[in-house]
Amino acid sequence: MQFKQIGNGYILKIEKGEELIRALTVFCEENGVSSGSVSGIGGTDDVVIKYYDLEKEAYCSKCFSGKNYEIISLTGNISLVQGKPFAHLHVALGDSDYHVLGGHLESAVIDITCEITIHMTDDVLNRKFDEELKLNLLDF
């Protein structure tokens, strides 16, 4: 990964073969990023997206691979869960047939590059486990 500091944030270039969530989390840990917004674009050919099933109180995941997916939009935020950076990201993916898939991003191995912008906030955002929904939600 390569990065450049800009104003109140960073631009990251995640390299081919790197797993996006892991690379972003390690970057935040090493550079003291605890809270902010995230946006990005890029490409992946091995990605897992999921959605939260309220009835099951659990995420349902699905893997997509081998189609050289374009990351049309990556958006979300960075906050802290038990004092450690947590990336909450959603993604829209496009394939060669111009179909779009989307959901909560669980993992993505970059196959070309991924360009991410992080805009840091002055305040620290924390997440706390919500017993009713079984999710780590923002805790103000």
Image (cartoon, rainbow, N blue to C red):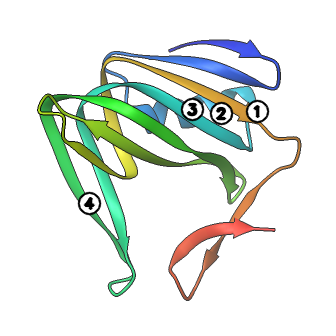
Depth check, mark 3 against mark 4: the one in front is 4
Question: At numbered mark 4, what does the secondary structure look like: helix, strand or loop?
Answer: strand
Q: CA distance from mark 1 to mark 3?
A: 10 Å
Above or below, comparing residue 132 to residue 121 in the picture:
below
Return the x and y of residue 73 as percentages of the image width and height.
43, 36
Between residue 67 and residue 4, name the one nearer to us: 67
Q: CA distance from mark 4 to mark 1?
A: 30 Å
Question: At numbered mark 3, what does the secondary structure look like: helix, strand or loop?
Answer: helix
Marks 4,1: beta carbons within 8 A: no
Q: CA distance from mark 4 to mark 2?
A: 25 Å
Marks 1,2: beta carbons within 8 A: yes
Q: Tag 1: Cα neighbours inside 10 Å, few (<14), some, or many (≥20)?
A: few
Question: At numbered mark 2, what does the secondary structure look like: helix, strand or loop?
Answer: helix
Q: Residue furthest front?
A: 98
Between residue 115 and residue 139, name the one nearer to us: 115
Q: Give the residue type that dot 1 points to.
A: Gly
Q: Return the residue at label 3.
A: 26
Return the x and y of residue 74 as percentages of the image width and height.
47, 38
Q: Give the residue type that dot 3 points to.
A: Val
Residue for point 13% across, 30% down: 67
Q: Return the residue at label 2.
A: 28
Q: Return the residue at label 1.
A: 32
Q: CA distance from mark 3 to mark 4?
A: 23 Å
Question: At numbered mark 1, what does the secondary structure look like: helix, strand or loop?
Answer: loop
